[in-house]
Amino acid sequence: MKILVTGAGGFIGEALIPHLTAQGHQCVTSSRQPQPHGVVWHPPQQKLQQEALAGVDIIIHLAGTGIATKRWRKSRKQALLQNRVELVEDLANTLNQLPKNQRPKKVLIASAIGWYGNADARADITQPCTEQHSAGDNFSAELCRAIENAAKPIAALNIPTVLARIGIVLNPRGGALAKMMLPFQLGLGGPVGHGQQTMSWISRTDVVRALSYLATESLLDGPVNLTAPNPVAQQQFAKTLGKVLHRPSFAPMPSFIVQLLFGQMGQELLLEGANVSSQKLQNDGFGFTHPDLEAALRAEIFA
């Protein structure tokens, strides 16, 4: 199949492209700059052209400004909302302009488990979060809700649309684990805040496999949680990472330090948590390569 992957140069995209290619698929990528076999796409300056979708069977949309690169000041939050929503809206508008027989067979939109907000503290959630739970009330939830709302016109075109609610992706090349590696390697790692917040994680290997599965094999659409079957408390995560790296994990980072250094971003991404279930994905037949944390960390760090 011919698959368009937006955000192909990002943390997940850079691993997804080789995986899809190895599976025998033809990949087309999008970027802000011209590249071989690529599509220039940088809204609002450059709209996605209908010609870019010629012959495309599947779209996997990963593009968007990184949420954890800067403090969430008011202007930054507005920029995140504008960028990520605008990309999905432009994709929807382009698909709407295509003749029905030229539209892709399926579209995957990257969302996140941020949809559930601080689920650990929500009175209406007493069991692991499933796709049926409503959105939370913090900025992470607002951002995910805006992205998923922007994708509704795609589903309205009768194109199966998967909203991939991705958990904390583990690989030392990026994401949360990349930021944790140095402190732990220096023997300064440990639990963040009270350490009881739930981390619903997934190895990068498995998130790539899950995206490929949802795009090319599964009949699922709508929201799908992409998290490993065994979430852990942050304190347990720190202990396990220390064990894998043969380093101590007893140097805590108090909540007030997190808030001082990172503001609202640190509060939501580091001090709050959500116990998220991937049972929908598993019931559909997907099997995780790394269902357990220690094995996942060893595989991702030492691969």
Image (tube, grey):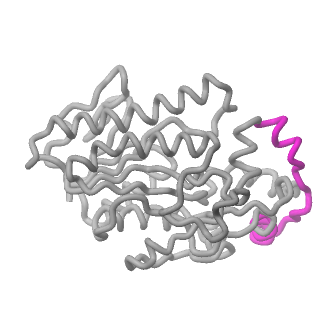
Which quadrant holds the N terminus?
A: bottom left
Q: Quadrant of residue 302?
A: bottom right
Horizontal relation, residue 81 to residue 184: left or right:
left
- Would residue 185 be counted in the magenta stretch? no
Q: Position of residue 112 (x, y in %)?
A: 52, 52
Q: Is residue 26 visible?
A: no
Residue at 60% from the left image edge and 71% from the top image edge: 299
Q: Residue furthest top?
A: 45
Horizontal relation, residue 45 to residue 267: left or right:
left
Horizontal relation, residue 90 to residue 70: left or right:
left
Residue at 89% from the left image edge and 49% from the top image edge: 254
Residue at 57% from the left image edge and 46% from the top image edge: 141
- Would residue 243 be counted in the magenta stretch? yes
Q: Position of residue 279 (x, y in %)?
A: 49, 75
Q: Quadrant of residue 95?
A: top left
Q: Is residue 281 visible?
A: yes
Q: Residue furthest front?
A: 124
Q: Position of residue 168 (x, y in %)?
A: 60, 57
Q: Position of residue 156 (x, y in %)?
A: 25, 47
Q: Quadrant of residue 227?
A: bottom right
Which quadrant holds the C terminus?
A: bottom right
Quick one: 203 or 26, which is closer to the camera? 203
In this rendering, the answer to whether 266 lies above or below 163 is above
In this rendering, the answer to whether 236 lies above or below 137 is below
Horizontal relation, residue 254 to residue 218: left or right:
right
State whether the magenta stretch is mostly helix, strand or loop: helix
> How many numbered marks, from 0 up?
0
The magenta span reads 237-262
